[in-house]
Image: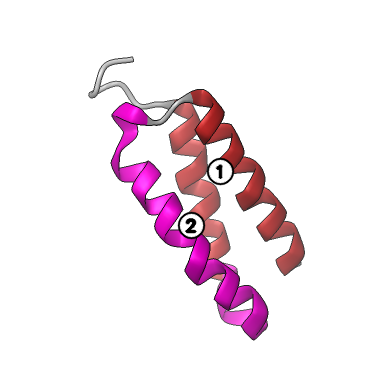
Amino acid sequence: MTPTTPNPELTALKALRDEVKLKLHLAGMELKTEWERFEPQLERALSNTAIVTGEIAGDLKKRLTEFRQRMS
């Protein structure tokens, strides 16, 4: 994958991140605190796409999906 080719896993992560951020305003304090710890890790991965492996992207997607489910 070249630097100019969009990585579909990272594109999905960005969309999922955006959805979670929209729902955060309704979340409780515990979830907001957890998000504050998780978001920097996610942002580092999204800004360093050249070093993110499929395994790392998969792990982040799993964690983000679980987080979104707890918000519902």
Q: Position of residue 69 (x, y in %)?
A: 75, 58
Where the N terminus falls, by quadrant? top left
Judging by the rendered image, the residue that carries numbered circle 1 is 60
Residue drawn at the location 47% of the way across and 27% of the way down: 8
What span is colored magenta in the figure? 23-51
**58 w.r.t. 24: above or below:** above
- Image point (30%, 21%), residue name: 5
Query: Quick check: can you spot residue 67?
Result: yes
Give the percent coordinates (x, y) of residue 11: 44, 36
Amino acid type for the residue under numbered disc 1: Leu
Name the residue located 61 percent from the left edge and 51 percent from the top edge: 64
Instruction: Classify 22 as above or below 52.
Output: below
As for residue 42 lying within the magenta part, the answer is yes
User: Is 71 drawn above or below residue 68 in the view shown?
Assistant: below
Residue 34 shown in magenta: yes
Residue at the left extreme?
4
38 and 66: which is toward the camera: 38
Q: Nearer the viewer, residue 21 or 43?
A: 43
Residue 18: image tag: 2
Q: Amino acid at mark 2?
A: Asp
Tell me: residue 63, above or below residue 55: below
**Secondary-structure class at tag 1:** helix
- The percent position of residue 62, horizontal first and vertical second, equals 66, 42
